[in-house]
Image: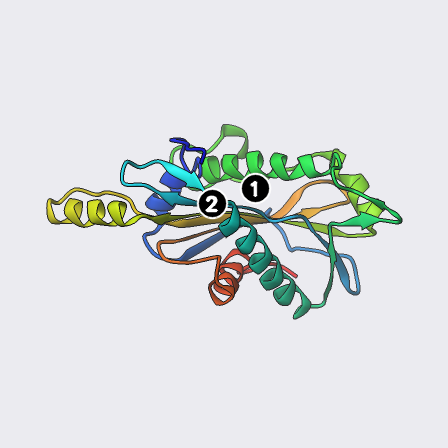
Amino acid sequence: MRRSNSPILLAAGVALALAACARTDSLAPEGAFERPPGTARVLLMPPDVELYELTAGGLTEPQAQWTEAAKGNLADAITAIIEERDADLVPFAAVGDDPLTPHPYTQVVKLHEAVGRTILVHGYLPGLSLPTRKDRFDWSLGPDVVPMGEAYQADYALFVYARESFSTSGRVALVIIGALLGAYVPGGQQVGFASLVDLRSGDLVWFNQATAAIGDLREPDSARTAAGNLLDDLPL
């Protein structure tokens, strides 16, 4: 099994700085949100989800089966939430008779990850705001996403990013020992963010980050809670 000593999320420090328990915090451009009249069509991009096991030594081991279960649970939960609103959800799958997998648009998910991580650092951490965006939310995936709106006849694209780690018994023991000695040893956690992108321009019209010290995307009920946190304050 592949091991990695890279952080589960570049902004894990953001999560620790913001909250030790479940918390959400959204950002949006100034001014009232204006969506097209009538029922909005929202393209749900494939959820970018990865689950890991956190070892005693602090290494994160990717867990493929856990990840696949989490992706399905989270997608189902997001679908249920969107269907409760005046919006039509359009899954990213295929257009016409030709499948879009693999397709260049799937690279947009990676672009969203990069932009989202940047927002977490420069949009939430005090003192790290960018001079050109200090007092305003102005982020975009660029005009390359506009064709997705045409291909799927969608007004917006919804991107969701989530990372979750679970402590091994050895890691749990280390956390307990650290607490007894007055030292902080991080355990498993759930971190993520979501964005609503205007497919007429590629601009982000809403962004939300959610963190939780306890959660389990492998379980449908927990995934529904996580989806509710990620889509909290979604302007649809």
In the image as oriented, which residue stretches furthest toward the front?
A: 1
* Colour treatment of the image: rainbow
Residue placed under numbered mark 2 in the picture: 63
Q: Residue at x 48, y 63 (%)?
A: 219
Q: What amino acid is at disc 2?
A: Gln
Residue 97 percent across, percent down from the top left:
89, 48
Q: Secondary structure at mark 2?
A: loop
Residue 34's place in the image compared with 135, above or below, is below
Crowding near the residue tagged with mark 1, few <14, some 14–19, many ≥20 C-alpha atoms within 10 Å: some
Depth check: give the residue in front, 39 or 20: 20
Three-letter code for the amino acid on which mark 1 is drawn: Phe
Residue 203 is drawn in which quadrant?
top right
Question: What residue occupies the far bottom of the structure in this picture?
Answer: 84
Q: Is residue 92 left or right of residue 6?
A: right
Q: Secondary structure at mark 1?
A: loop
**Which residue is at a point 55% across and 60% down the rendered structure image?**
233
**Quadrant hosting residue 104:** top right
Q: Work out whether residue 125 can be spotted.
A: no
Residue 153 pos. (x, y %): 83, 52
Question: Does 219 sit left or right of 165 as displayed?
Answer: right
Q: Is residue 73 above or below residue 101?
A: below
Count the labels in the image: 2
Query: Is residue 14 among the parts visible in the rendering?
Result: yes
Mark 1, residue position: 137
CA separation in Å, label 1 and label 2: 35 Å
Identify the image quadrant of the N terminus.
Answer: top left
In depth, the one of 74 and 117 nearer the eye is 74
Residue 74 location in percent, x, y? 56, 57
Which residue, as the protein is rendered here, is positioned at the far right?
97
For this orientation, the residue located farthest to the left is: 181
